[in-house]
Image: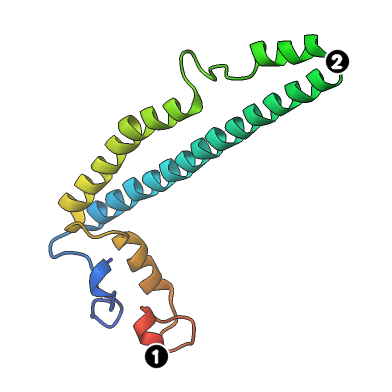
Amino acid sequence: MGPGADGRTPSVDQTHRRPEGATDAEVEAAGTVSEAMEYIERARGRLYDLHQLIGRADILFQQAADQLDQIGRAELAERIRTEVVGINLLHGRWTFQMVEEFDDGFWSTARELDRSVRDELTGGRRHVFEAEMKEASRSRGRRGHEATPEDSN
């Protein structure tokens, strides 16, 4: 984002200011990588949801098997214990292993690449693209349109 209509560069806070020499295309590319990382973070949250949901279901299946034993339905209880309780969700993996493999592999690699792109294109600054969008969209002087929290004092 270049100078505004008045010839001045918008007053983006220093944390998110475009570094000297960074082009629009570089800032946009860094923003796209950042957006991709946000989707990965959302997916990671869902993976942790899966981990906890399956773990809770496993405990409930164990509880149901105990209840079935108590009412004389040992055959059904045994099927639950042997066919569902403690079974791998994926080949050779419980959900904790899926979470760890994801975190140690893809997620860690993506985070490092996000950081490398930011370091190279925006001097390590995060959300430069979004900060410039905010600056271009806000109505200066209006409550709720402050550039930073400090501006609202």
User: 70 or 5, which is in the foreground?
Assistant: 70
- Label 2 SS: loop
Q: CA distance from mark 1 to mark 2?
A: 70 Å
- Which residue, given by chain and number where applicable, does mark 2 sit on? 72
Quarter occupied by residue 62: top right
Q: Quadrant of the N terminus?
A: bottom left
Going by the image, does 117 lie left or right of 60?
Answer: left
Q: Quadrant of the C terminus?
A: bottom left
Q: Amino acid at mark 2?
A: Gly
Rendered location of residue 3, percent (x, y)? 25, 74
Query: Vertically, is 36 above or below 119?
Result: above
User: 135 or 153, which is in the foreground?
Assistant: 153
Q: Residues within 10 Å of mark 2 (few under 14, many from 20)?
A: few
Name the residue rendered at 71%, 28% in the picture: 63
Query: Vertically, is 28 above or below 20?
Result: above
Quarter occupied by residue 152: bottom left
- Decide which of tag 1 and tag 2 comes sooner along the chain: 2
Rendered location of residue 86, percent (x, y)? 57, 19
Rendered location of residue 100, percent (x, y)? 38, 31
